[in-house]
Amino acid sequence: MPELLSVQDLRRCDARRSTTFESVLLLRKCSTRQAKNGNEFLMVELGDKGGSFNASIFGDSPVFATLKGVREGVAVRVLGQTEWFNDRLSPRLVEVRLLDEAELAESGALERLVASSPLDANDLWNELQGHVAALQRPSIRAAIEILLADLGNSFRETPAAVSMHHAYRHGLMEHTVRMCRAARALLPLYPEVDHDLALAGIIAHDTGKTIEYSGALAAKRTRKGLLQGHVVLGYRLFRGAALKAKLDPDLLERIEHVILSHQGELEWGAAVMAATPEAVFVSMVDNLDAKMGMVQNTLRNAGNEEFSDFLPGLKASLLLTPPPPVEPVATEE
């Protein structure tokens, strides 16, 4: 059996010649397009935990019939040849076969497909408990503890997004912990922001994603996720926990407002615009970590290219080459 190449392996192939390869990959996206001559073709995104690539599949290819109408989020075994278009990896797919769960388990490829946080999940969870313990008001701390207990393992496993940022296993927990770190570093600069309200809002702000997303191989939006969205779902989850903790109505309303406004802009999914110091603060920290999460993940999965593909969340392609090292300071003899 030939060696299965990862996406990073393919990116390291010599772009000056075509290389035949086999891979087990995840069908992340598959859409039907129409060429200028009126013929249909498929635009697909295939990937694994180390990255992804796009490929066009035209109607005269046997792969077209295999993938047309297939749901996204399935695993496939691919035979192809490396090709580049505008300096981007865009392989020609020769054969594609759908894999069932048994074949996927036997191939040992499951761990290669499902991306996880680069940070240890147990370490993230333990650090999160420290941030919960830092909440000074017992009633707020109790509400957050009830919320996390109600969520169970889903909070630890859920990604923070489908594709934009921290879009991998444990991504929600990583995003939340990174926001807690940033907030506790910045809070001393802004005494107008209440520590407990901001930190509790951060821990609760994206919990609705535990309901919004589902799928073992690739995150997909659920019915409730599509009809209500994680902002409203998170608001409801926290409200239920806060009522169990008998949280003061004024504190409850302020934290609910953080959750409802954390997306920053109405067109980005916020239910309302931030109207308290804590809500403004949390929405900015959320935006910062989301953007830097995109940067970090892109740099981790970079190949030999100078620039990344266009990143919708940044509205730009990212420069991948590092700056020159700092020159040593000359010392007087």
Image (spheres, rainbow, N blue to C red):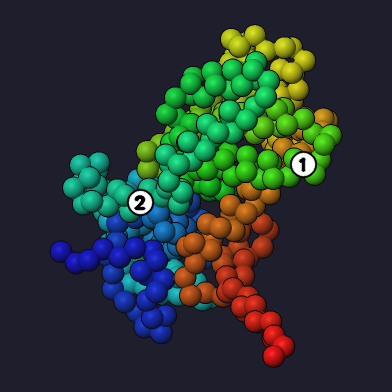
How many marks the image carries: the answer is 2
Could you say which is closer to the camera, residue 186 or residue 264? 186
Residue at 19% of width from left, 67% of height from top?
2
Judging by the rendered image, the residue that carries numbered circle 1 is 188
Judging by the rendered image, the residue that carries numbered circle 2 is 113
* x, y percent for residue 311: 61, 59
Could you say which is closer to the camera, residue 313 or residue 81? 313
Horizontal relation, residue 119 to residue 256: left or right: left
Horizontal relation, residue 96 to residue 119: left or right: left
The amino acid beneath tag 1 is Pro
Residues packed near mark 1 inside 10 Å, few (<14), some (14 to 19) or many (20 plus): few
Q: Upstream in the sequence, badge 2 or badge 1?
A: 2
Q: Is residue 71 above or below residue 82?
A: above
Q: Quadrant of residue 292?
A: bottom right
* x, y percent for residue 115: 41, 50
Q: Does residue 133 appear anywhere in the picture?
A: yes
Q: Is residue 216 above or below residue 108?
A: above
Q: CA distance from mark 2 to mark 1?
A: 41 Å
Q: Does residue 205 appear anywhere in the picture?
A: no
* x, y percent for residue 31: 48, 51
The amino acid beneath tag 2 is Leu
